[in-house]
Amino acid sequence: MRLIRYGLVFLCLGLNGSWGGTEPGRKASSQGGMNGVEYEWSVPLSASPEMDCIRITTPSAVYYFEKVGAGLAAMMDPDGVDWIGFRPEPGTGSGGEFRGFPNAVHRQAGSYFHALNQGTDPSTLRLERKGPDHIAIYVISDNRLWACRYDFYPTHCSFTMTAVPEGYGYWVLYEGTPGGILEKTDWWITSGTLEPQPASVAFTGDIPGPEWIAFGDPEQDRVVYVLNHEDDDKVDAYYPMNWEMTVFGFGRNRLEKHLTTPGPSFSLGFIESSDPHEIAGILNEKAKNE
């Protein structure tokens, strides 16, 4: 297996709490990186140094949040492997520019909450909360119609849509690279399918509650999961795109967007296990308590 590893380069600026504001020369740390949650307000994305990101470090993952598009561009596991692998170059498609989380608004009064590519519209953000084990980022689209919140905790991050324009819909996607690269030996399970399925097996249908999916790599004792904290009756779907990335979506059927209201939260994180029953137990508990 070829693992994608990026070196880390830091350019540290702080934040004064206003929309898009920064305070030079400041790094914010709540509790020491390996115990709580800390951020650096201005860090280049290693795969594309011209991209300005917030780097959020937690004990379980390191996230790169691209600030103009307002979406996750990278999610590093404790071994330094990126399970998203966004690159902005036009024409890379599923090999780079399509990747990310949550990639929520696609051609619905704009395209928002996706790491910046040629089709992403800009948003403005502010740091809404910073504490020893919780950082929250509030985002509003440039047309003022869409808004959302990202919450980063020691164990996971969550996305919540807080404003949806009438007559439009969205989805919540994980478009990434399990274990650093999508391969046919990779696998997935859901709350309704605990027998590991090859990554080649696509599905469309409402995942039964508690709604979650986990993607694994046979060479790693780790999975990435996406969890819907609200059991709904919306269609969900997965397929591998060109064997370059996963396309999984809550509320997605082809290009149809079936989520239409603000409120439900969707979490993304790692679990340090590859045992389906252990993963199910952890995620079922998370669905009840987080």
Image (spheres, grey):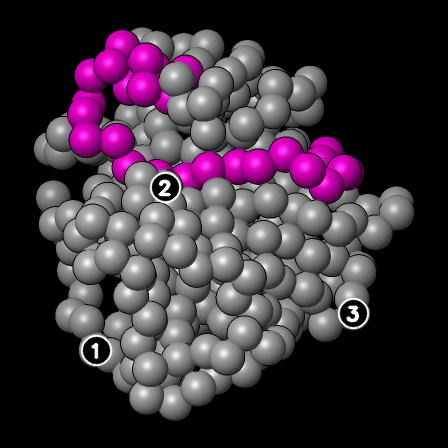
Badge 1 density bin: few <14, some 14–19, many ≥20, Cα 10 Å: few
| Secondary structure found at label 2 | loop
Residues under numbered marks 3 and 2 in contact, where contact means CB atoms less than 8 Å apart = no
218 in the magenta segment: no
In primary-sequence order, the first of circles 3 and 2 is 3
The amino acid on which the numbered mark 3 sits, given as a three-letter code, is Asn
Residue 162 image position (x, y, % from top left): 70, 48
In primary-sequence order, the first of circles 1 and 3 is 1
Badge 2 density bin: few <14, some 14–19, many ≥20, Cα 10 Å: many
Residue 139 image position (x, y, % from top left): 62, 62
Q: Is residue 34 left or right of residue 113?
A: left
Q: CA distance from mark 3 to mark 2?
A: 29 Å
The residue located at (55%, 12%) in the rendering is 208
Q: Start and end of the magenta stretch?
A: 257-284
Give the residue number, with chain letter if any, for mark 3: 143
Give the residue number, with chain letter if any, for mark 2: 156
The residue located at (24%, 79%) in the rendering is 10
269 in the magenta segment: yes
Task: Name the disc covering residue 9, or none.
Answer: 1
The residue located at (76%, 38%) in the rendering is 261
The residue located at (57%, 37%) in the rendering is 265
Q: How many marks?
A: 3
Residue 102 image position (x, y, % from top left): 52, 49
Q: Is residue 10 visible?
A: yes
Q: CA distance from mark 1 to mark 3?
A: 33 Å
The amino acid on which the numbered mark 2 sits, given as a three-letter code, is His
The amino acid on which the numbered mark 1 sits, given as a three-letter code, is Val
Residues under numbered marks 2 and 1 in contact, where contact means CB atoms less than 8 Å apart = no
- Front residue of 42 and 112: 42
Q: Is residue 61 left or right of residue 142?
A: left
